[in-house]
Amino acid sequence: MRFLHTSDWHLGQNFMGKSRLPEHRAFFAWLLEQVKQHEISAIIVAGDVFDTGTPPSYARELYNQLVIDLHQLDCQLIVLAGNHDSVAVLNESKNLLAQLSTRVITQPADELTQQLVLLSRQQQPFALVAAIPFLRPRDMLLSQAGESSVEKKQALQQAIAAHYQQLFAAAQAFLAEQRLQLPIILTGHLTTLGASLSESVRDIYVGNLKAFPSDAFPPADYIALGHIHRPQQVAGQAHVRYSGSPIPLSFDEVGRDKQVVLVECAKEQVVAIEELTVPLFQPLVRIVGDLSAIEQQLQQVAIDRPGAWLEIEVQHEAYLTSLAQRIDTLCEGLPLEVLRIKRQRSAATSLTSEDSQTSLAELTVEQVFAQRLAEEQLTSAQQQQLEQLHQQVLTQLLDPLAEASVSSPDKSESV
């Protein structure tokens, strides 16, 4: 009997002005096919169902339709709240969704057994899920007067570790009471030590706790984690995994396969773990080089990946004016869309490098503006608008100065 581990759907995400709705629709269609093909009995979503606490109506509609479709396929759905999810939004429909084979868990419960979910196939249980969502500080402990930041971090980490141990013990006690021998599946939505991040992981876990030690997890048969968007094993342990997001959520995820994890249970244990690669529904491409190299790469991408969304990083020592317009000219007529343009910052022009000794007096106005612009994540249209405004301001400032420099000699001669 099998279940799927997935996470970080981020339904409703607005990616540099672009909706991800077509990609999420395609992913759900693919997911339903996997349920049929592999005879999946349950799906665990380890947090961040939605991208924001106030998801748009089309994202909620997509989520609700998936619940219906999975129910019709006799597939359970276990939904854990993530740090991007609103507890109130997920809770508002959880009692209704419970009638459709869906269990929603948003917070640690007063009674630990409320966080236990039996996975079954045709009324035959095959695993027990000890479900832990994103744990907020207010859910775990009370702030104590006079505590230092280090003490607060330690107290929070200890409280989270204690919750995992207590829930695991409750799961063992439940199985003993029910006279069942089943694998125990733990979940979590957090950062663990050694996990590889991406720029789309926008929030640190909780408070000042940046990472949870993997050796603090109880000895569960499988630990399904969310929050990190790159699929990976934790500390080399095949049974402790981040499934990663099903679609790339930032350009630094380009070229990395996306996946869901298929876990097979038999004879009261996990017997197989398989990675199912998710198709790429919307190509994202990063292009790096000078303008000549970028032009060549654009022509090739247009052939290989028509319709791609692009991030272009321009390598050039000199400041180039109207960069967005130059890129738009290179892309003219190509089936591509530029979402972000970046200037590669060199040691000679960097303002923020710790090793740089360059002062503002040594830089031109254009260099200062270029470096500041490079620190922002802007669309091509936004960058072009700012560059145009910058040129207008410079023109307005420099014209009076030019007039003054011409008239000044005449005045000196008259004196």
Image (cartoon, rainbow, N blue to C red):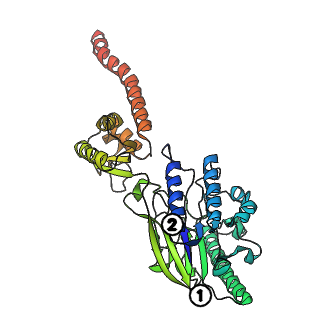
What secondary structure is found at the residue carrying circle 2? helix
**On screen, residue 342 above or below 71:** above
Three-letter code, disc 1: Glu
Q: In which quarter of the image is residue 173?
A: bottom right
Question: Residue at label 2?
Answer: 34
Q: Type of residue at label 2? A: Gln
Local crowd size for mark 1, using a 10 Å CA cut-off: few (<14), some (14–19), many (≥20): some
Work out whether 220 lies above or below 58.
below
Q: Cα distance, mark 1 to mark 2?
A: 24 Å
Comparing 396 with 179, the one in front is 179
Image coordinates of residue 231 in percent, x first then y, are 46, 68
| Residue positioned 41% across, 59% down in the render | 253
Q: Which mark is residue 268?
A: 1
Give residue 132's quadrant in the image.
bottom right
Label 1, secondary structure: give it: loop
Query: Which numbered dot is residue 346?
Result: none
First in residue order: circle 1 vs circle 2: 2
Which image quadrant is residue 322 in? top left
Q: Where is residue 47 in the image (x, y as percent from the top left)?
A: 60, 64
Residue 131, position in %: x, y? 65, 73
